[in-house]
Image (cartoon, rainbow, N blue to C red):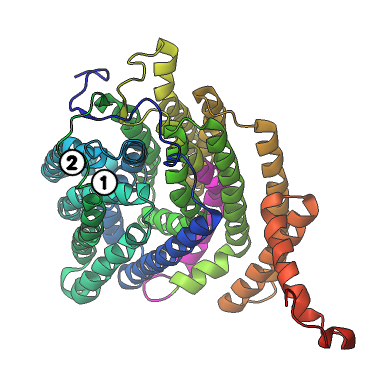
């Protein structure tokens, strides 16, 4: 099967879209704000439950060879989630469904393209996911030996890996349904999947940890993945029925062409990006027991700072995909530049907080039960090094979505079927960028781990992902989205300067108290105020705009009405 040969014919639009359809028009800012609010609340709930999950793991099992074995098995859902939920599936199917929705609006009397896309893709996806899940379960011993050859309890890791292999199928279903719903601008149910996921894990962990040990966490992962998919089925079927009455007795004169090979660079990029975790597990397995656990806890805390930044692009990605499907590169560019700035501001604020308050945050969250002061110190040091790569992680999350949207898994039949060789090679540019970044990760890790241990592994991660982000920024311009790089980089420079100053002031404030809670509050408040003041003073639009808006709202509250004002009627009467 080639990329130019259709596997199924789907209704295509008329040559000229109807004026009233406005298929590429972006939704109003109020809709985006509401969608972001809903997504943020539910994602925060999911992250909170995930943090509670990690706290219970640390409390019940600490950081030892048992948790190391589980975390090697955790590599399966940790790899499947980006591939099947967050990244690859979204990169492929949100643009595909966005294009189908544009076609539905352009030609509402034609057979529904959304239903045709589902019929052409979902059965093959279910078959592939089932086979992959079975393969992982059968190959668990070889997978554990490959990922962590120095593991102290490989048999336990094999058992947990076979249990977590179940997650591949429901993860894929959840990712597919979530992509379809987000393309329809329905964000509530997709935002709630991690709430369902972590509730499943917590239920089994609390009920079975005394009898099953760390295996209870693996069983909870399997149950949680099933709950994720179940949550999305009914909302997806509702959206699918919207087009059930269109074009039943009419054949379209044109067709959409499925591009199955478009998934290869997307999947390769996601797996290569996830390979950083494989490198960490591999290098960490040769270090003292508990090292992999320290890396895992540090990564989980560090990623919380990136959550809000990724939420921004989760909501705006369907907007960018629709603009690209309608051929509006200017609107897509403006949205991507805004996303780059907003995501960087949010993530740099979180990075400053973590670097300033890492010891008190870890002590507050984890230091109880089997997790002792030495574990706190080791995890806090890793967090500070990990945090250096968080801005790059967020920028990659913003840039890779529009990059792959320019070559979705479906295309219009009247588009050119072939492209110059150089343009086709650009499909693989993100993979090459990620491979170079991975080479930096491996090189720094190998050179630094012998002397610095887990800190060397974390430094390799930060250096590799930063190199990849720099390459992708250039690649997005090559791809055809005309980013104004000087404007983007200047804005980011202001944000980095504000974050550096906030980190120094926050660390000084956190050191004033030995109590973890008070130190975290002092440091966090100082970081927030310093970042807002410095960002505003340096002219960072992403900081100055919200700060001035808050000041405008607060000004009437601080200024009491004068005697002359009290007798005046309200404005407009």
Q: Is residue 324 left or right of residue 77?
A: right
Earlier sequence position, callout 1 versus callout 2: 2
In the picture, the disc for residue 122 is 2
> Vertically, is 83 above or below 529?
above
Number of residue marks: 2
Q: What element carries label 1?
A: helix
Is residue 150 visible to us here?
A: no
Q: Position of residue 328 (x, y in %)?
A: 51, 32
Per the image, is 390 magenta?
A: yes
Residue 501, picture quadrant: bottom right
Q: Where is residue 396 in the image (x, y as percent from the top left)?
A: 49, 40
Residue wearing tag 1: 176
Q: Is mark 2 on a helix, strand or loop?
A: helix
Q: Where is residue 159 in the image (x, y as percent from the top left)?
A: 15, 54
Mark 2 nearby-residue class (10 Å; few <14, some 14–19, many ≥20): some
Is residue 382 visible to us here?
A: yes
> Vertically, is 349 above or below 430?
below
Q: Where is residue 442 in the image (x, y as percent from the top left)?
A: 44, 34
């Amino acid at each position: 099967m080639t990329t130019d040969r259709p596997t199924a014919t789907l209704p295509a639009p008329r040559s000229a879209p109807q004026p009233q359809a406005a298929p590429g028009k972006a939704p109003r800012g109020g809709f985006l704000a509401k969608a972001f609010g809903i997504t943020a609340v539910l994602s925060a709930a999911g992250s909170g439950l995930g943090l509670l999950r990690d706290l219970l793991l640390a409390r019940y099992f600490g950081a030892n060879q048992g948790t190391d074995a589980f975390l090697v098995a955790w590599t399966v859902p940790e790899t499947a989630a980006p591939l099947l939920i967050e990244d690859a599936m979204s990169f492929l199917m949100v643009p595909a469904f966005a294009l189908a929705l544009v076609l539905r609006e352009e030609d509402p009397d034609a057979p529904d393209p959304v239903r045709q896309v589902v019929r052409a893709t979902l059965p093959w996806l279910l078959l592939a996911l089932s086979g992959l899940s079975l393969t992982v379960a059968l190959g668990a011993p070889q997978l554990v030996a490959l990922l962590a050859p120095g593991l102290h309890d490989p048999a336990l890791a094999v058992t947990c890996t076979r249990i977590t292999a179940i997650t591949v199928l429901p993860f894929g279903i959840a990712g597919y349904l979530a992509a379809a719903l987000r393309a329809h601008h329905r964000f509530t149910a997709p935002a709630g999947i991690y709430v369902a996921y972590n509730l499943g894990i917590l239920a089994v962990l609390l009920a079975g940890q005394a009898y099953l040990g760390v295996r209870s966490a693996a069983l909870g992962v399997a149950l949680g993945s099933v709950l994720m998919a179940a949550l999305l089925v009914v909302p997806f079927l509702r959206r699918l029925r919207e087009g059930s009455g269109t074009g039943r007795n009419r054949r379209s004169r044109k067709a959409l062409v499925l591009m199955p090979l478009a998934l290869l660079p997307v999947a390769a990029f996601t797996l290569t990006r996830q390979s950083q975790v494989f490198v960490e597990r591999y290098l960490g397995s040769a270090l003292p027991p508990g090292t992999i656990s320290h890396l895992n806890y540090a990564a989980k805390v560090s990623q919380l700072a990136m959550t809000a930044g990724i939420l921004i692009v989760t909501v705006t990605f369907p907007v960018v995909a629709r603009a690209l499907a309608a051929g509006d590169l200017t609107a897509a560019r403006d949205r991507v530049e805004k996303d780059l700035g907003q995501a960087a501001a949010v993530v740099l604020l979180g990075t400053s907080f973590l670097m300033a308050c890492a010891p008190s945050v870890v002590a507050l969250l984890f230091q109880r039960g089997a997790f002792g002061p030495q574990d706190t110190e080791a995890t806090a040091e890793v967090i500070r090094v990990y945090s250096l790569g968080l801005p790059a992680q967020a920028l990659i999350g913003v840039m890779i979505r529009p990059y792959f949207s320019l070559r979705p898994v479906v295309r219009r039949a009247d588009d050119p079927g072939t492209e110059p060789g150089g343009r086709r090679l650009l499909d693989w540019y993100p993979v090459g960028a990620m491979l170079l970044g991975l080479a930096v990760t491996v090189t720094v890790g190998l050179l630094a781990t012998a002397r610095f241990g887990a800190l060397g592994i974390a430094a390799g991660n930060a250096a590799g992902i930063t190199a990849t982000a720099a390459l992708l920024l250039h690649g997005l311009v090559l791809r055809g989205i005309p980013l104004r790089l000087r404007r983007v980089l200047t804005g980011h420079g202001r944000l980095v300067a504000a974050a550096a100053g906030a980190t120094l002031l926050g660390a000084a404030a956190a050191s004033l108290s030995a109590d973890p809670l008070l130190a975290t509050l002092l440091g966090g408040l100082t970081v927030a105020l310093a970042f807002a003041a410095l960002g505003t003073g340096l002219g960072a639009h992403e900081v100055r705009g919200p700060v001035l808006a808050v000041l405008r709202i607060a000004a009437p509250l601080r200024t009491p009405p004068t005697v002359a004002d009290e007798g005046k009627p309200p404005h407009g009467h």
